[in-house]
Amino acid sequence: MTAAPPAIATTERPVAARVATWVFFGLNGFAVGLWVVHIPNVEHATGITHSTLGLLLLILGGAAFLGMQVAGPLNDRFGQRRLVPAAGVLMGLSLFGPGLADSWWTLGLALAVFGFSNGSLDVGMNAQAVVVERAYPRPIMAAFHAMWSIGGAIAAVIGAAALRTGVPTAVSLSLCGTLSVVVSLIAARYLIEPAHPDALPEEDEPARSAPPARLVWLLGGLAFALMLAEGVANDWAALQFKDVLGTSTSTAAFAYGSFAVAMTIGRFATDRVAALVGPVAIIRYGAALAAFGLTIVVVSPYVPLALIGWALFGLGLAGGVPQLFTAAGNLDTRASGALMARVVGLGYVGLLAGPALIGGLAHWMPLNIAFILPIVLCAITVFFASAIAPRVAEGN
């Protein structure tokens, strides 16, 4: 079992910073969810085709990855108290763009800004979460990720209400963007900076050494595998019910719903469990549970059993990624942002690549059989989970 992350030298718990970090995670999920809800309206307003939208979404993903790589080193250099709120403000302002776009190129520009700000905030808020977690005697990272899901759910409710009442897309996105800017500025004052690593005495010099590159790539590879599996559920769960099990569209929605609810509940519960069994066990047994759950989905001809499978899949995936991000952020406190940018970036690539890979495989084989790919990746994660233990323990 591994120990908890190194604590900041204080007996006070930064409760305000914890709440502020929750807010930024919620805002990030809220912004992404609000955009997703309004995609059909934006597509209609700009007069673009589905294929053009697909290409523009690639721009969004590429800009988000670029934002992660730029923001990581900047967080280390200028501090999270500056960069995280700046990214939050930019993200709020970027919500104006899609609602005002009237052509493919204006939408592409808007999505590039939105993606860049989203990626920047993603790295910054995860780095801040690691700093806050160090001041607590137990893991708290997974709850931050649960707040991202809560933010997305709130966006879905607000977006659906706005669409139902006929509020113009530009108005609803702009109002929510303005709210995000205001909340980011209010929450900014409560963020904290990490303890200065240069205060280490000479005898602790080994703790200053840079982490092995292979370990950073391993953490990134595991994040890629688990987030690829998550992306498969996001885009293919409902289609699997409809196309393979022959359900109605309304029933098919329960497939993703069972996955999402189980993942959110699992993330709220993960921190308590991780405090008892350690992060490696969370990653190993969580990935095993995810593989088992998706296997049930693949082989089950019955809707109720398949729903259980999707729920187990979400529950298994719930805790792994937060543990990997915590491990990355604690590899080297001097370059926490840059290291997290690599790991979070690789995970994000997996999230984007998963649905596309499954779509390609589905051209050659039944959709259920294509799901063997994320099952295999979860099994690989089980095998390599223990590889992070020496460095995690070493940093504690």
Image (tube, rainbow, N blue to C red):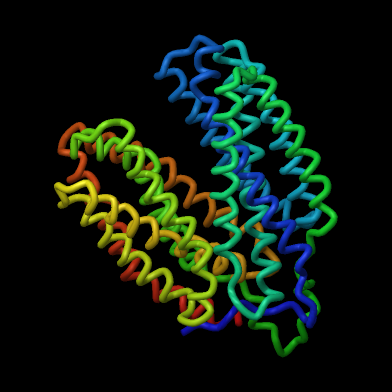
Query: In which quadrant of the rendered view does residue 325 lie?
Result: bottom right
In this view of the protein, which residue sits in the foreground, 202 or 102? Answer: 102
Query: In which quadrant of the rendered view does residue 288 lie?
Result: bottom left
Residue at the (67%, 30%) spot, across then down: 95
Where does the image place residue 21, in percent across and percent down from the top left?
Answer: 70, 57
187 on left or right of 2: right
In this view of the protein, which residue sits in the foreground, 282 or 381? Answer: 282
Residue at the (74%, 56%) spot, across then down: 20
Above or below 296: residue 370: above
Where does the image place residue 307, in percent across and percent down from the top left?
Answer: 28, 51
Q: Where the C terminus falls, by quadrant?
A: bottom right
Where does the image place residue 71, in percent across and percent down from the top left?
Answer: 68, 48
| Extreme-front residue of the structure | 165
Above or below 197: residue 370: above
Query: In which quadrant of the rendered view does residue 377 lie?
Result: bottom left
245 on left or right of 32: left
In this view of the protein, which residue sits in the foreground, 1 or 151? Answer: 151
Residue at the (19%, 44%) spot, across then down: 368
In this view of the protein, which residue sits in the foreground, 61 or 246? Answer: 246
124 on left or right of 9: left
Where does the image place residue 43, in percent across and percent down from the top left?
Answer: 50, 17
Above or below 344: residue 212: below
Residue at the (68%, 76%) spot, across then down: 136
